[in-house]
Image (spheres, coloured by chain):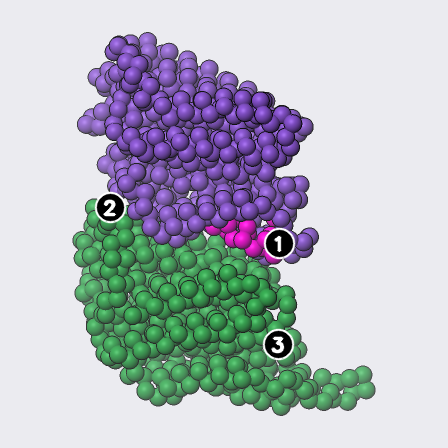
Amino acid sequence: MLAFTIYLSFAGALLLALLPSAWARASRVIALLAAIAGFAVGFIAFTQAGGGGSIAIADLPWVPQLGIRYTLAADGISRVLVLLTGLAAVAGILFSWNVGDSEGDRANEFFAFFLALIGGVYGVFLSVDLFLLFVFYEIAIVPKYFLIAIWGSTRREYAAMKLALYSFAGSAMVLIGLLAAYAQAGGHSMNLQALARYPFPISFQMWAFPLVFVGFAILAGMWPFHTWAPTGHVAAPTAASMLLAGVVMKLGAYGCLRVAMSLFPHGLDPWGFTFLGVGSWRTVFALFAVIGIVYGGAVALVQNDFKFVIGYSSVSHMGLVLLGLLTLTQIGIDGAVLQMFSHGILAGLLFATVGRIVYVRTHTRDLGALSKLQLSKAMPFAATLFVIAGMASMGLPGFSGFIAEVQVLIGAWQAFPWFAIVAGVGIVVGVAYTLRAMQRAFFSDTPAVDANGAPAPVPEYDPVTWPEIAGTVLLAGTSLLIGIYPRLLLDVIAPAVQALPHALLTGGRG
Amino acid sequence: MNALVNYGDLFKVTLPETILEVISLLVLIVDLAWLRKAAQATRMAAACSLGVAGSAAAIAWIVGHPERMSFAGGALVATPLVNAVQIGILILTALVLLLSVKAEFSRNPAEFVAIVLLATTGMMLVAAARDLLVIFIGLELLSLSLYVLTAFAKSSAQSAEAALKYYLFGGMSAAFMLFGFSYLYGLTGTTNLSQMAYRLSGEATIPLAVVASVLIAAGLGFKVAAVPFHLWAPDTYQGAPAPVAALIASGSKVASFALLVAVTEGFVAPRSSETTGHSLWIVLLLAMAAGSIVLGNLAALVQTSVRRLLAYSAIAHAGYMLLGIAANTAQSGAAVLYYALTYALTTVGAFGVIAIVERATGSDRLDAFAGLSRRNPLLAGTMLVFLLSLAGIPPLVGFWAKFNLLAAVLRATTSTSWSLPLVILALGASAVSLYYYLQVLKRVYVAKPTQTAPLPVSFLELATLTGIALAVLLLGIFPGILSGWIPLG
């Protein structure tokens, strides 16, 4: 049944692509219905499947001559991420409700690309056959380009091209690894589980693992390959930023875990020598992850464009995900998957606040300009929302981010004590940049003064609309719910993590 | 050709070619006898429909007679793979003719169609030939027809320049190739490829064979536009009338790659020998492949003319296919032909869109495509499909063909020493290629149109292009459809 998340999204995209442009106003309704239907399917499957175990969805021969099959299945990790995708899709459409208000919006195309991207993302999370997974992974690249290049803002064509080329370069690296693994294993099967059982020689894994890992990690925003992320997030229209940070970066992290680490667990083993104190790919990438956490936070601290603050914070948060994965411990990987979910929700919420609720009313994202607008009085809804989202994002107890970050840090403490300490510092930096942005954008009571020195009055803005409230409630409510009762997700994630290849959870210690 | 010629067999093997020849004469007669006073458009439509009908008849004959045959000691063969390639060539010709119905470059429609059919005959002979003499005759028939076709836009100086360049380069490379063939004949005493492989296998490296390899590589490298024999391609693609450029980029490429597969099988000694993978021929192919992949993709980055861009992209694609030929296994040969056929199909579609845009805007520069998605969404959609398929984005057939080809190269036991680095080069370069395909698509979808009026397209052209785009999509989603014709895996 879960396969219908994919079919519904692509069917919606096709319908919208063929829709006459005179019907532009209907397009957002169609898109919303398709997204809600996909979300509903994902949600029902999530509740029905209960705890652990992988549910098979489809298994049909596709290209029998090459051993490629159309195999879909969903274990706990997939189900959680499918749920996240559904949430992000629905919220993204709610926060793009203004697309289609005016003639030149090309709303049909916008929502068609949006749903095509969503369909690809669902597909990646559900594929078991690696060929299929790769097909969906690449399907998700092209819509991103057009969403940003056509509907974006700041330097949109540059940002879109950069993002597309980074993604495509990453996927080329992944494809090299997959082809090599496929040929090495005899070319009988592309099934992930079958290949994971094949004993690839250690020397093979030692080069294939970093290649595939980096290929995916580019999309997860790993330092130093993260530079597409801030520019892309800033240039993208709100809904696309929400999707980019919310689910597309998760594709990368998911690929790292599901493909690179599961297929080549011995690539994480020590090299047998140390270079500058670094003795394995695991340490190299964990170091990159930690640098990303601190660096992303530090850069976010000095940005003046509100969206850049959120963009760099995404790099920082995704660093935590990667660090959690590389701990190779149950609790660390649990935390990483939970952090994927949590960050997907919160990044969506933050981008919606900044890019949609505030920007469409003030037409500026500059923190200096915003600080003169007395937004806490002029837009109390947005101010409250940002306080909630910001607190959740900096990891205050009671929100989803806290549980995830604690688990990652505990895992990291067991594996790399020093990195855990530095990552902890990075989280403190996260508090700092969030508070700084919050203070300057919303709570800086220094109204602009006119020529006579009289303070400007509190500006009047359009009231909040129903789609904005609905999207907010959806995302903030989910974060709060998971924060209060994290077992809702953890009980599903943990069995799936346990079921990962044995060599993965015991690996890296050589 | 020692065997006694059996004319019954000859007639059977070459009946599809004969059909094309007869039709090409018929086209001329019909035009001359009944349509002299008719409007230009009617004459073109009549000539093209006859050509399409002829291609269809030839396809029907091949499909109806799938038996294996070989004629005159193997000078011409009809294996399932050769049949598949011939059918592919005929389909491509028919598509090119369908897309040229509205073309306005020529006042002599019947001559145009007749020569296109002659070129097709040449392609089909080249695909089936396994004898040096027949190969050369087929190639010359093909090449001479293409030279004439390139110059067909008589009022265009560019067309004449392109034809002259194409002709000079082509004549020179044909001379090289013939010279190489003569050495081979001198060495082995036979012109038959399979006997030649047998006689060459026993010998150690013969200096004369080295010279022959280089000469033949130059000749065939010209036909497939591989670096360093690629210089004609950008000018010819740019100057030739659009349907002719499509034909050069599609059918002619397919035939040349089919020939290259056959020559490589014949040239490299039987596969049992250990040293085969390192023979000079393979080294030449690999050097041409690496050069084409790198230079084609890099040069395409800076083009502002979409036709030149496609020419350099064609050079890059030729590089990928040469890797498959160098691997020289049954699978990789089939994978190359699959790649060549699907690539050709996509390119015909892309040139169809270019022709329409050119007719409306008078230019093939990138900016001429600005805002196409708003002027004609369906046409823009087909261009999206074609270019993304060329870039190798799933679920389009270009991705599948590339995957199949590179998997075959990596799996071949003949290529273990070089396969991984060159596959990495190919995939890395294809990541670069996305940039220039997106440059076109950026104009089509992102840029503001300079004119807002809808772009007129005739129903026939739009239907043909939509059909090609659907084929590109469906072949990508269900790659197994063709496996009855071209074996996979």
Vertical position of residue A468 compared to residue A111: above or below:
below
Q: Are marks 3 and 2 in contact (CB under 8 Å)?
A: no
The green-coloured chain is labelled A
For the residue pair A233 and A96, the one nearer the viewer reads as A96
> How far separated are the C-alphas under marks 3 and 1?
30 Å
In this rendering, do the residues under marks 2 and 1 share a single chain?
no
SS class of the residue under badge 3? helix
> How far separated are the C-alphas under marks 3 and 2?
54 Å
Chain under disc 2: A
Vertical position of residue B342 compared to residue A237: above or below:
above
Residue type at numbered disc 3: Val
Q: Which color has been applied to chain B in this rendered view?
A: purple
**Residue A156 visible in rendering:** yes
Residue type at numbered disc 2: Gln
Q: Which residues are magenta?
A: B369-385
Chain under disc 1: B
B262 left or right of A56 in image: right
SS class of the residue under badge 2? helix
Chain under disc 3: A
Question: Which residue is label 3 attached to?
Answer: A360
Q: Are marks 2 and 1 in contact (CB under 8 Å)?
A: no
- Could you say where residue B174 lies in the image, as x and y percent from the top left? 46, 18
Could you tell me which quadrant the C terminus of chain B lies in?
top left
In this rendering, do the residues under marks 3 and 2 share a single chain?
yes
Mark 2: give few (<14), some (14-19) or many (20+) Cα within 10 Å.
some
**Residue A436 visible in rendering:** no
- Could you say where residue A185 lies in the image, as x and y percent from the top left? 21, 48
Indicate which disc residue A65 carries. 2
Indicate which disc residue A101 carries. none
Q: Is residue A273 magenta?
A: no
